[in-house]
Image (spheres, coloured by chain):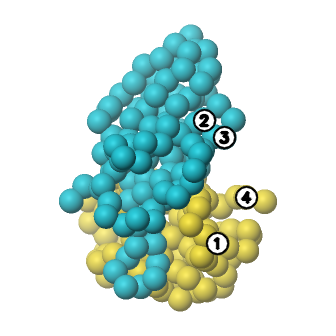
Amino acid sequence: DTEVTQTPKHLVMGMTNKKSLKCEQHMGHRAMYWYKQKAKKPPELMFVYSYEKLSINESVPSRFSPECPNSSLLNLHLHALQPEDSALYLCASSQRDSPYEQYFGPGTRLTVT
Amino acid sequence: AQKITQTQPGMFVQEKEAVTLDCTYDTSDPSYGLFWYKQPSSGEMIFLIYQGSYDQQNATEGRYSLNFQKARKSANLVISASQLGDSAMYFCAMREGVGNTGFQKLVFGTGTRLLVSP
């Protein structure tokens, strides 16, 4: 099973809402990633979790709060977002020390109104 | 400084023909890895092919091959016998270290949109 799943597929939220994005993988990968992709731009790394610990935070605003409850699950909690946060949010996973590919999920298209 | 450059915003090819998507990179690290990903309109990033800097031969995966020219710092993707389903955005990416963390991340180019016509 080489699948990374993400829910929801689409999300519309107001600037005062609190919502969460969910990512799941069952490949035994120990590194999981959140990327943000604006329209017509490449993905940009937000966070990396390795062995369920936050390893990299690419200076992401605190209104984005990641969480890794276990080795298969990665959440991204959203609060007080701005319209410019509207984007495709991609989750990915990889073997911890693998120099090779990351497996991506289908993404969540987020619109902040 | 931009490390991955894709100079072709869009490419057109007819079905069954071959197409080359260009990618140049810049790094001072002797050990690096280069990737190509495909992103259909559905949004998912699909891994296509990987080339390590020390690999002696150009990588191939089915209809995909990577034309790796180390001295020129280029890693072009060649798709042979194009199919309608190949229409998508294609990203070149390079693995790079993150400070002294020991971790690595992917840095992507701006992408090339490929359209395959019947």
CB within 8 Å, label 4 to label 2:
no
| Percent coordinates x, y for residue A41 in the rendering | 33, 48
CB within 8 Å, label 3 to label 2:
yes
Q: Residues within 10 Å of mark 1 (few under 14, many from 20)?
A: some
Q: CA distance from mark 3 to mark 1?
A: 21 Å
- Say the numbered circle drawn on residue B64: 2
**SS at mark 4?**
loop
Kind of residue sitting beneath label 3: Glu
Chain hosting mark 2 = B
Which residue is found at the position 59% from the left and 86% from the top?
A52
B42 or B60: nearer the eye?
Answer: B60
Chain hosting mark 1 = A
Q: Quadrant of residue B61?
A: top right
Q: CA distance from mark 3 to mark 2?
A: 5 Å
CB within 8 Å, label 3 to label 1:
no
Q: CA distance from mark 2 to mark 1?
A: 24 Å
In the rendered image, the residue lying farthest to the bottom is: A53
Chain A takes which shade in the image?
yellow
Question: Seen in the image, is B116 located left or right of residue B83?
Answer: left
Q: Are marks 2 and 1 on the same chain?
A: no
Q: Which residue is mark 3?
A: B61
Q: Which residue is mark 1?
A: A95
CB within 8 Å, label 3 to label 4:
no
